[in-house]
Amino acid sequence: MSHKTNAARILDKNRIPYELKEYVVDESDLSAVTVANKVGLSIEQVYKTLVARGDKTGVIVACIQGDHELYLKGLAALSGNKKVEIVSLKEVLPLTGYIRGGVSPIGMKKSYPVYIDSSITNQEKVSVSAGLRGFQLYLNPHDLISITKAHLGTISTKL
């Protein structure tokens, strides 16, 4: 594959098997549902990465199923915060090194605590952004949990 992303290089270095799936990006629709359709996966397998800030911990990262929304109270409780809010869009690139629609929980500029909705363990394979719009990593959820040192809990609700 011609585009090795930082996230893919980290997986290679740690000998974690994955597939890099490429798709055509529609700048007007960066939704997880669209990504799932383009890469031929069910929406239950596509996890979106959200960047948040806790009142006690600072920046944290959440991965939730593509057709779910972040349950802020659940994320706050799991992360040891009283309150959590999504960071503004203009903060995403400076904080993570990634642009909206291409935020991967793997290989951010800085290592932030990662929280993944526990529903991920119901899947054999999941997909997260590879760190570049138009590329998804397809891997075992336990490998994703391991490489990101993620904490699991109920942090999302169905849309």
Image (tube, grey):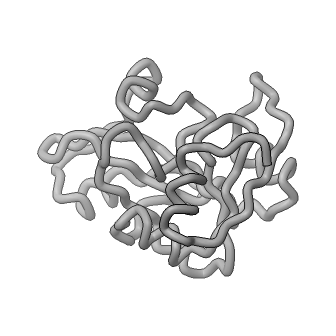
**In this rendering, position of residue 71 left or right of residue 40:** left
Q: Quadrant of residue 71 in the image?
A: bottom left
Q: Residue furthest top?
A: 90
Question: Going 67% across and 56% down the picture, which residue do you hit?
Answer: 137
Residue 44 is situated, as x and y percent measured from the top left of the image, at 69, 66
For residue 26, above or below residue 38:
above
Q: Is there any visible trace of residue 126 in the rendered image?
A: yes
Q: Is there any visible trace of residue 159 in the rendered image?
A: no
**In this rendering, position of residue 145 left or right of residue 21:** left
For residue 123, above or below residue 41:
below
Residue 95 is situated, as x and y percent measured from the top left of the image, at 35, 30
**In this rendering, position of residue 40 left or right of residue 149:** right
Residues 10 and 71: in front is 10
Q: Residue furthest left?
A: 56
Q: Quadrant of residue 6 in the image?
A: top right
Question: Going 26% across and 64% down the picture, which residue do you hit?
Answer: 78
Residue 16 is situated, as x and y percent measured from the top left of the image, at 57, 71
Q: Quadrant of residue 132 in the image?
A: top right
Residues 63 and 73: in front is 63
Residue 63 is situated, as x and y percent measured from the top left of the image, at 49, 56
Question: Going 46% across and 66% down the picture, which residue do you hit?
Answer: 117
Q: How many marks?
A: 0
Question: Going 26% across and 54% down the picture, which residue do you hit?
Answer: 76
**In this rendering, position of residue 132 left or right of residue 83:** right
